[in-house]
Image: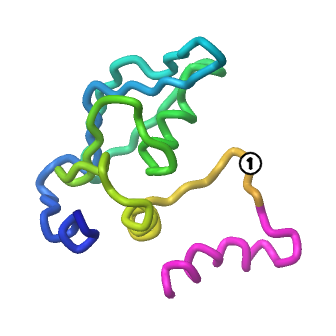
Amino acid sequence: MSSQDFYANADTDKPLMQVKGLIREFKAGEQTIRVLHDINLTIHQGEMVAIIGQSGSGKSTLMNILGCLDQATAGDYQVFGQSVNRLAPDELAKLRREHFGFIFQRYHLLGDISARDNVSVPAVYAGM
């Protein structure tokens, strides 16, 4: 599905984000470690949501999937009713660039530019 098809088919009456049966596993040698177990979550436009839990509970893993920085091992993830599971890397980048905002735990600021310019970097990528 192209990005244009994704946006043309988006239904803004649907939840902003919805995950069903989300599973994320990682290989560790011979073992498979399941970090996210059958997560179901629905977020509507305008809602404020906090993802809380103990260290190592999967919060960052879930946020990376919701932010299209990682993909689930199984389950379905939709934005405005459209599945993002099979989007190509460029389509995922467009979705991140145009619809998601992230503040990472470790900021990874560019040391050679000012704080203001660091904050402006995403706008440059968005063509503003």
**Mark 1 residue element:** loop
The spot of residue 13 in percent (x, y) is 11, 55
Looking at the rendering, in which quadrant would you find the N terminus? bottom left
Residue in the picture at 76% in, 58% down: 108
State the residue position of label 1: 106
The spot of residue 96 in percent (x, y) is 44, 62
Local packing at callout 1 (Cα closer than 10 Å; few below 14, some 14-19, many 20+) is: few
Residue in the picture at 42% in, 44% down: 66
Residue extent of the magenta highlight: 109-128
The spot of residue 70 in percent (x, y) is 49, 44
Left or right relative to 115: residue 35: left
Quadrant in the rendering for residue 74: top left
Left or right relative to 105: residue 82: left
Amino acid at dot 1: Arg
Question: Is residue 70 on the magenta stretch?
Answer: no
Residue in the picture at 42% in, 67% down: 90
Left or right relative to 114: residue 78: left
Q: Eyeballing the image, is 91 above or below 86?
A: below
Judged from this view, the residue extending furthest toward the top is 31
Quadrant in the rendering for residue 77: top left
